[in-house]
Amino acid sequence: MKKSDDRLLFLPLGGSGEIGMNLNLYAHKGKWLMVDCGMSFADDHFPGVDLVFPDPTFIEREKDQLLGLVVTHGHEDHIGAIPHLWRRFECPIYATPFTAALITDKLAEAGLLDEVQLHIVEHDGPFELGPFTITYLALAHSTAEGHGLVIETGKGTIFHTGDWKLDPNPLIGPICPSSKLEALGDKGILAMVGDSTNVFNPKNAGSELSVRESLIEICKGRSGRIVLTTFASNVARLDTAGEVAKATGRHIVLLGRSMQRITKAAKATGYLKNFPKVLDEEDASHIPRNKLLILCTGCQGENRAALARIARNDHKHLTLAADDTVIFSSKIIPGNELVLGQLFNMLASNHIRVITEKDAFVHVSGHPGQADLKDMYSWIRPHIAIPVHGEARHLIAHAALAHTAGIYHTLVPANGDIIEIDREGARKIDEAPVGRMVLDGDQVIPADSPAMGDRRRASQQGFVTASVVLEEDGELAAEPRLAVLGLPTNNPDIFYDQLLDACEIAMDRMKPKQRLNDDSVEEVVRIALRRLCRSTLGKNPGVAVLISRLEDEQY
Ligand SMILES: [Zn+2]
Ligand SMILES: [Zn+2]
């Protein structure tokens, strides 16, 4: 893109077609601006992998023209990829104080703190990055410092909403800034690029204050320990846990690394000012059971998180017993029902009461429902609506809602679509390369790399390794050696002999000339072993064949 290029472009590399790993780019006058750089959690498709990122190859190639990464807020789907991908595009980062504190932690852990220019934006006035003038606009969300971005360009103004909700009493964050949003609408917004997560909720998101009141009522007069689990990033909910402890005469203890990390960042940036004194884990174990509130991570049933550990009696100091209560003050995220169901059953069979959002009012979302979206469109009145932060079904429903709210031009983007935005509307003009990266061990590799395919095959089908030693003329110098991993054999010795026979018969059938070529031998043996596994076990394992060939002087 040339400096003289007056077009205004939008390009999502992640987050359009999925909920997670948001990475959005804007371009104008030859310069690029990145908004957010998030991650997703891996599913069973990537065995052995926890984190997934968008592929930044496109912006890596354009990095000389990349002015900065502006971060809307500190959720992992907006900042989680920064420490893993930053080296690929190396640009300054802009964030508000709480978000910056979370990013700083991540950069320090990755050893990048000295290299990254992290600018903390403490004011709500505009700042300039080349042809973009950017203003943070505070919005309520399920973490502290949710923000939309007003991005002014010579071609018109974008309102990039980030994640948001309207909350008459969010406890942390602005109370429904309708007049500010209306004033923004009055100035004229070319396009609103916004959150689609909860478009299927016909109502509004609901208020944090009402959750606080409800949780206090639920916890009053309870016997036994109370465990409250939520996303650690939900600072208002953590504050509520502190208020519940105070209102019910309980001491509080925090379990889980992210709970400690986020409360530290929140306190350092001026939040949780009235939070009660936190007990250490050992002291907490000596407090009478009906005087303790445990605030912990693991609300999605994560196996290694604090809640799952205390539930299976795997914590050094704290245990649960009959008559205790576990409150899941969180959404049950689709896909996690099975693992959560197992955790609910484990707790129930120990006579521990479980309360989830299905049983009582213990959670509100941080994303706009239809009522909130309609209000937002009535205030902002953008010329164009571009839904992001959603799966295809969310984006399509959001575009339809925008249309009924009187927004004539809508466009549903997909990751990699290069979209031109002007007064005529928004249209796809080109495609950028897109893909996914995974963090495997401590290496970031493409999600479609052979390593992932091999891992998937080995984990689902098992693995056979054969070592074949040949004399120089191609005869077998010794009986092949085999290693079998993860195959369903009732009699391993017999199966081993069958594999060995298959290997030797395949070798016998080869022409002497063929046997002089290592690649041919490898291929023939692999096919023979795999065929045997298929016919005798119904499995199609990965097969590795190692060929060694003795040289003349060795015998
Ligand atoms: Zn968020
Ligand atoms: Zn998000």
Image (tube, grey):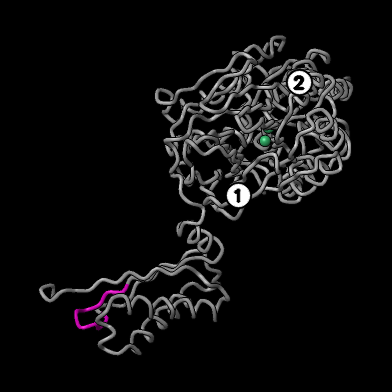
Q: Residues within 10 Å of mark 2 (few under 14, many from 20)?
A: many
Lateral position of residue 60 relative to residue 403, left or right: left
Residue 276, quarter of the rendered image: top right
Query: Is residue 472 on the magenta stretch?
Result: yes
Q: Position of residue 52 (x, y in %)?
A: 56, 45
Q: Nearer the viewer, residue 210 or 95?
A: 95
Residue 195 seen in the figure: yes
Tell me whether circle 2 and circle 1 mark residues in contact (CB < 8 Å). no
Q: Residue placed farthest to the left in the image?
A: 553
Name the quadrant of the C terminus.
Answer: bottom left
Residue 34, quarter of the rendered image: top right
Q: Secondary structure at mark 1?
A: strand
Question: Which residue: 87% across, 20% down?
Answer: 213
Q: Nearer the viewer, residue 279 or 55?
A: 55
Q: Amino acid at mark 1?
A: Asp
Q: Position of residue 418 (x, y in %)?
A: 58, 47
Q: Residues within 10 Å of mark 1 (few under 14, many from 20)?
A: many
Tell which quarter ligand 1 is in: top right
Q: Amino acid at mark 2?
A: Ala
Residue 256 seen in the figure: no
Task: Tell me the distance, in whole angstroms, between the alpha carbons under discs 2 and 1.
Answer: 43 Å
Question: Main SS of the magenta segment?
Answer: loop
Question: Which residues, given as a range, are shown in magenta?
Answer: 468-476
Q: Position of residue 147 (x, y in %)?
A: 68, 25
The residue at which mark 1 appears reads as 417
Lateral position of residue 176 relative to residue 420, left or right: right
The residue at which mark 2 appears reads as 241
Which numbered mark, 2 or 1, is in the foreground of this view? 1
Query: Is residue 504 on the magenta stretch?
Result: no
Disc with the residue nearer the chain's start (2 vs 1): 2
